[in-house]
Amino acid sequence: MDAKEKNELAELVEFLKANGIVKFEMEREGRKVALEFAGAGGIDAAHLATLLAAQGKAGTAHAPAVATAPSIQAAAAEADPHAGAHIVKSPIVGTFYASPSPDAETFVKVGDRVEVGKVLCIVEAMKLMNEIESDFAGEIVKVFPKAGQPVEYGQSLFAIK
Amino acid sequence: MLRKVLIANRGEIALRVISACKEMGIRTVAVYSEADRNSLHVRFADEAICIGPPRSADSYLNVPAVISAAEIAGADAVHPGYGLLSENANFAEVCRASNIKFIGPPPEVTRMMGEKSTARQTMKKAKVPILPGSDGVIASEGEALEWAQTVKYPVILKAVAGGGGRGMRICRTKEELPALYQQASQEALNAFGNGDLYMEKFIERPRHIEFQVLADEHGNVMSLGERECSIQRRHQKLIEEAPSLQITPKQREEMAKVIKKSLKDIGYWNAGTIEFLMDEDGQIYFIEMNTRIQVEHCVTEMVTGVDLVKAQLRIAAGEKLDHIVPEVPKINGHAIECRINAEHPEKFTPSPGKITVYNVPGGNGVRVDTAQYAEGVVPQYYDSLIAKLICHGKDREEAMNKMQRALSQFVVQGIHTTIPLHQKIFADEDFRRGDFDTKFMERFLERQKGK
């Protein structure tokens, strides 16, 4: 990869990060780029295509940008750094909130020690605030979702060691 | 038009709805259980949300999970498919309360048609012929004889408190009625603590005939003709066809008028099917209404050229019926559907597992609706339908020949399927002649045992 291509790639990465895009694939002039970001948030394909077109980054004739159907969960997030940690997963579909109310402090933060039963967060579903309790005792090493982020059944919420 | 639809279902029908939406530029959201993570309906939707563990009760039937998914995805409508939540009036109400458009009739209508006795009363009021029944307890042998006289034999005595075939007696002559009455009553008393009986007309060799309807939200109703679904095993349909060889064009027209009026009266909208039994004299009687799209909707699509799922979406978006189906469609040719299940073709034991080879037939007038694929897994948690094979020909003979050819090219390995069973049925003389009723499969399987 030459310097020009490296610059283009760096610009692309910044663009994707700034717009919260989790996964991206593109083929252009015989080169293929596939990127996946650890971390949360997703954006849908149509929005991505619009953003790219607006920025003039749409590829040449033979292969349009392809964004894979995003599942809200970011797969990379639970990998190496938290090997051996217990992952608290969401038992329901809804919206994740780290604090009991917008101005209040978060229920827990990285570094806190928690017991089984400690309320870690709220997942709101159908206007009901469901408190999610810890099923493991230990130290919080990672909080996966951002406040206000949609989560699905089984999605990783916290890593506890 | 609808902007984003969440499909509250799985398997082939979820893919069917997703495909229709895609063709109409509507964005799609799939929901799935952990067992369906690698399904085609998940793969081909624009967005997908995991809503629970494998068991249906915890996932596909979990109303809060489905609604929550619709909320976080910003869906403006939900298509419930068939089975699962499609005829759950509660679910339709929750959708309405959550400002999500339910693609189907209003909850009040679903509830009304879901209750057997209210459905019968409703249809009776609308002058739809219903299977004669003694709307109430038959208190004595004398009353029984009187009632049977008016309705004509054969009749069936049934326990008011009962089910499962107990407290039931079929009676074919007035001579045997008093004794059978006593037997049924005693059996019911022993089984359910209540010896009360009611009676219905009994049809020895019924044919199952159903009519497809579409209605918009402006009071316009249309019948799209009938299907015959007499090939059933234990009340599960195996083969369906359109049109029925038993229905004349005149009858079709008459039924269309009656259906139009009755559905208008009850305030029905979207797609639905009205089911009838036909007796040996060609008389048809209402038995129930299904307030949803059905598995076998495809055969109607093949003979009318109307895309029923797209019609559902357009109706839900508020379009008028005469824009969707400008004129009553002519019935063109003949279509037959075989339901291919993941079951042993003789023992009917379920056969979940990994499919190693999956060669789907094609060709002129051959349609396969399936969400399975080679290397795909058929999970053990849901119903066994893996594909629908539909063949359309200029007449029944051509449709049957195509079906035989297509069945012979439908290769599935790794699991058992009912493809060999269908091949035997299509070679059967009675079936080919169109000489059957809902007891056909019993007789057919007996004949097979003999071989």
Image: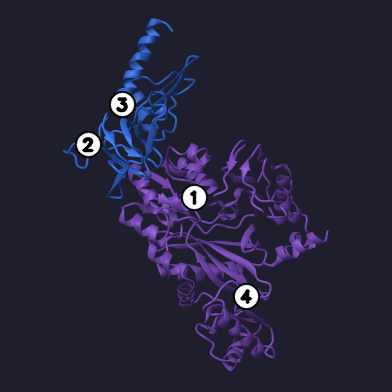
Chain colours: A blue, B purple
From the viewer's side, name the closer residue of B340 and B343.
B343
**Please, which residue is most extreme toward the top here?**
A3
Cα distance, mark 2 to mark 3?
Answer: 25 Å
Please state which of the two labelled residues, at mark 1 or mark 2, is closer to the viewer. 2
Give amino acid for label 4.
Gln
The answer to whether B228 is drawn above or below residue B418 in the figure is: below
Label 4 sits on residue: B283
Cα distance, mark 2 to mark 4?
Answer: 71 Å
- For numbered disc 1, what is the local secondary structure? loop
- Could you tell me which residue is drawn at 66 percent across and 40 percent down? B360
- For numbered disc 4, what is the local secondary structure? loop
Label 1 sits on residue: B55
- For numbered disc 3, what is the local secondary structure? loop
Which subunit holds the residue at mark 1?
A: B
One can see residue B151 in this view: yes
- Whether labels 4 and 1 belong to a single chain: the reply is yes
Please state which of the two labelled residues, at mark 2 or mark 3, is closer to the viewer. 2
Label 2 sits on residue: A106
Cα distance, mark 1 to mark 3?
Answer: 37 Å
Q: Earlier in the sequence, mark 2 or mark 3?
A: 3
From the viewer's side, name the closer residue of B397 and B238.
B238
The label number, if any, that marks residue B215 in the structure image: none
Q: Is residue B435 left or right of residue B34?
A: right
Report which quarter residue A94 is drawn in: top left
